[in-house]
Image (spheres, coloured by chain):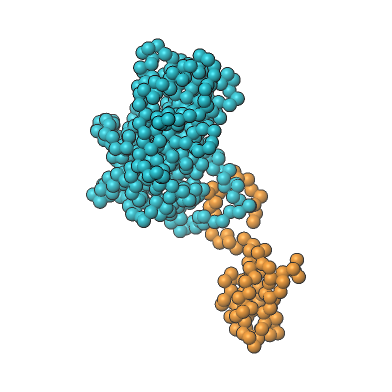
Chain colours: A cyan, B orange
Amino acid sequence: MSKKIVAMTGNHAVANAMKQINPDVCAAYPITPSTEVMQVFASFAADGAVDTNLVTVESEHSAMSACIGAAAAGGRVMTATSSAGLALMWEMLYVASGTRLPIVMQVVNRALSAPINIHCDHSDSMGARDASWIQLYAENAQEAYDNIIQAVLISEEMDVRLPIMTCMDGFIISHSIEKMELLDDNEVKAFIGDYKPHFPMLDVENPVTYGPIALQNFYIEMKRQQVDAMESAKQVILDVGKKFGDSFGRHYGFFEEYMLEDAEVAFVVMSSAAGTVKAVVNELREKGHKVGLLKPRMFRPFPAEEMANALKHLKALVVMDRSDSFGSAGGPLFTEVRSALYGVENAPLAFGKVFGLGGRDLEVHHVEELFKELDKASKTGTIDKVTDYITVRV
Amino acid sequence: MSDESKSYKVLPIGGLIPKAGSSHDYNTGTWRSSRPVHNKDNCINCLFCWIYCPDSSVIVEDEKFSHFDYDHCKGCGICQFECPTKVKAITMESEDKYR
């Protein structure tokens, strides 16, 4: 295996992965901060570096619609979007998953308007968490690159056949240059293999109807199938993560456990913020504090049981959400994690913090303050507030 | 439709129908509130009804009106409308009479 270490932004890394995947069709519409993914990929297409039919459309609704048509026709299909672009796809997200089409979409996480904001939070993809799309989140450019390559295999698996969004933080990852490893083109090609379409519409010898009406007599059966598909996806994600690790040296699972095994208190946080938290965990460990981190990689399907097992030995934990579900019992990640812990004997105290909306920086001192709250909770056995905001002026 | 008794575990995924011509098995005749009734004595076999029927529910045999396909006729009344005024071989009757 030839290692190629490069300096690359997250967007360039994903565009390069797409070049290596060489999908049949890409239909996309530009939106900050994901624009660069398709811009770079479009230059690959123009240079003849890929065989892809690049479809430029008039909106994200059309982009996802074209992806759905191309996937139903029997193609390997990819796209990318952010924020309002994902919101405009909403109707079609459910058509893609309900029709069981393995579309791979890079979501470059960005806040939703209003007020208009182009910077990172997870409001866009978290809002789509009930759309029956698999969701993987990346901490850095390397993980974004690795995730989207694995996403192709995960979504195409016959027991899964669900679309997948791989998410990375807008600007923080998408536009920052990091050191990372690019795989060899042939290695990627061999890893993902040839696409096997499921009932392609272009197979005229075997006609098939896509998108028929299903009322009281069939609809709920189709939804129940999606539950099984999500359940199957868990093992497939583990298998593909292992295959990737065995092939290229970087193993992937449902979540990363960072100094968690002997920890008494821990942070649960996704994406780029996990990098900041790791730095603080290192610093606190040097001072002798038993603190760790669990970084979810997979939000859909949500690995409730596995996560509860990884967290149950803790005295206290804080779940950090980069989006909010206004008026709910907490941010999307917090409510999932706390629900996963329900019924666990001697479950740790859990509280949630919403942070970093609209790209507000999460700084080291914010995480240090959170540790003080964790420490206090573990010593007193009580928490002051179940959910709150940090990184906000009060 | 026979599939209506089947478990979600064996139905094709994604609502796909992996066989051709399955709309024939779907009984849209149940949607009808009134039905066309044919009077053979008045009919001149111009076959306007056959031409205009949007659901192919006028069945013709040997170039003559044979019968209506009541499994697929939705009772739109176009056949009655198109039936020549001097002939009036088709009348719409309430479905209540046939229940």
Q: How many marks?
A: 0
Up the image or down, A327 lies above or below A293; here it is below
Up the image or down, B59 lies above or below A213; here it is below
Residue A233 in view here: no
Q: What residue is drawn where x is 55% and y is 51%? A: B15
- Classify residue A25 as left or right of residue A48: right
Q: Nearer the viewer, residue B55 or A337?
A: A337
State the residue lying farthest toward the bottom.
Answer: B86
Residue B42 location, x and y as percent? 68, 85
Up the image or down, A359 lies above or below B66; here it is above
Residue A324 location, x and y as percent? 47, 36
* Quadrant hosting residue A214: bottom right
- Classify residue A57 as left or right of residue A388: left
Residue B50 location, x and y as percent? 59, 77
Q: Nearer the viewer, residue A159 or A5?
A: A5
Residue A336 location, x and y as percent? 52, 32
Q: What residue is drawn where x is 39% and y is 51%? A: A60
Q: What residue is drawn where x is 62% and y is 82%? A: B83
- Quadrant into which the N terminus of chain A falls: top left
Residue A282 in view here: yes
